[in-house]
Amino acid sequence: MLKELVPVLHGALVWKLFCVRFRINEQKVILVLVNDRKRLDYYALAHLEDFMDRKYAREAVILFSDKSVSRQVKGMHLKAPARLCLWPEETIKALYDYYSFYKFSDKIVFTYTDRPKDNKLGRVLRETPIGEEEAVCLGLYRLRRVPELKRQAKEPDESKHKG
Amino acid sequence: MFDYKLARVEKMLSRLYSRGIFKDKKVYLFGVSENTRQIVQILRTYQIEPEAVLDNDKIKQGTYCSGIPVGPVEAVRDAENQQNMYIVCSLYWREMTAQLRDIGIKNKNIFMMYEEETLSECIYQAVRGKRIYERLTARYGKLPVFLCPYTGTGDIYLIGTFWKQYTEKVNIRDYVFIVISKACEKAARLFGIKNIVRLENKVESSYLIRYYMLCPEKGKITILNDSWGEIHTNPLEWFRGYKGLEFMQIFRKFVFDLPDHVQPRHPVFENKDSEVQEFFREHSLEDKNTVILSPYSNTLADLPDDFWGELAKALKKMGFIVCTNSSGETEPAVEGTIPVFFSLDTAPQIVGRAGYFIGIRSGFCDIISGADAKKIILYHARERFFNGSTYEYFNLKDMGLCDDAIEIQFDKSDEELFEKVIDVMKHERR
């Protein structure tokens, strides 16, 4: 059990450092784009302000490991202040390991679809008619509806990813 | 809410009451939920009747929660009045309290009853869960463990209807099947499910889940539900009722991974003729001329007592024997009816012999869905379950549990519903 606890505690440390560096408080949301599915990440960005409204947040921190995301964010012309943070994939995974065991914040959203084992979002996308935008609004942001897009940038070319 | 959390909330409310905080105050609760319903029950023991339940969901606004009107936050006329108290007991307390503060309510008037667990508490729970798991493996060996962490008998029944097909598919012959209530154990027994273990406290299932979350590969634990709140990394519940993901469909696909053509199968009911006959004799019930009323549901909306009272009166006038499926003080019999209580494992046979069943949609309806009787099931038309109406999500026909039930949606307990039910019964009399 100790073996499983180590990554959790490592993630907890990562989170502490992150909170200090970005001065995380109740008015900030954190979006972690993991690049599992580009279209999912796209809609997560496109509806970020809806999520912020729901959480009564004023700022966002966007965390990612793929450099192209910063271009995508700029193309989105978000109205709300957003700080970008490029982190190694492994560090993001450590943070998620911690989050998977302990929900340390309800203002952080990860776009993983098949991690950990019990995350069925990937199956929802592969095996039902539910698309990425609905997956973001209902499943990740829990908005209970799919609001009309406020911001639009060019969608990624990737068609609905299968598998 | 787990028992220990409920006890803590009870203590907090009792302390507030003994300090006189509720005196001359208008109490508002935020969010239609099981937590809110439990708090209402506690408040009522102090003769405190909340003014309203506040909810942002437009569909819930205008309905009732434990008999208390539900409205939007904006509908509180004198929101900033210092005599108002706002009770919040929800996972979403941050947004809720922020919303209240946004309309000028002071922190001192907001009473937070929700307590989040700390990391060390979660680790402690995982350790406890490991011990429970080890206890199970010591008794049964390293068998796959299936955990049903809920009290809903309807969920267990649905599990049962697919169980044989599932175990055959994954080629599992031996396993441990964990439930957390006696009723669930009985529902599972209907299907011949073996090695059923009933945990002594609900919270133990939470410990097991926490262990599973920490060591998903170590314990061979499967949670038999499409999703479970504690496992926050699985967002499936938020798609319930959306684009065809109704109760049965979502269980079939995501719990059992069975193909769409597989249909739920009722259990083979045991012959309990002598037991049922004795039950009928004891309560002076008549074969095929008895209406069993079932006015209670744990999860869904109920109907006012007047409706049931009037219905019972009318049915008796028509010559039926009328009884209420009542479990005692918390579920009293409808006025003028015979209180009856029977075990879930004889429920289908008893309802079949009675001939008639009228009930609000509850897990009990799943249990008796295969009974050979005229079944009238009532659903509140405006009640929602995630993305759909409760009717859309739970109706027995679409679940494949029966096609002979008359399932009626009602908007309120009006004449129309009463007439609809009576019309069906008059038709039966002809």
Image (cartoon, rainbow, N blue to C red):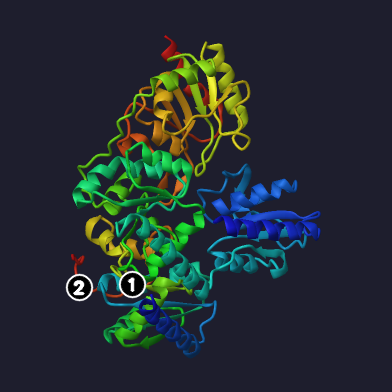
Mark 2 closeness class: few <14, some 14–19, many ≥20 residues within 10 Å: few
Which quarter of the figure has residue B21? bottom right
Task: Specify the quadrant that holds the C terminus of chain A.
Answer: bottom left
Residue B373: % across, % down: 39, 22
Q: Is residue B37 above or below residue A54?
A: above
Tell me residue A109's x, y (percent): 40, 72
Helix, strand or loop at mark 2: loop
- Please indicate, yes or no, whether residue B244 appears anywhere in the rendered image: no
| Residue at the limit of the structure toward the bottom, as seen here | A21
Q: Where is residue B233 in the image (x, y as percent from the top left)?
A: 38, 67
Residue drawn at the location 53% of the way across and 48% of the way down = B60
Q: Residues within 10 Å of mark 1 (few under 14, many from 20)?
A: many
Label 1 – label 2 distance at C-alpha: 18 Å
Residue designated by label 2: A157
Which residue lies at the image location 68% right of the left edge and 67% below the top edge? Answer: B104
Q: Is residue B175 above or below residue B117?
A: above
Residue, x 43% and y 51% (percent of image)? B386
- Residue type at the position of mark 1: Thr
Between B103 and B170, which is closer to the camera in this rendering?
B170
The chain holding disc 1 is A
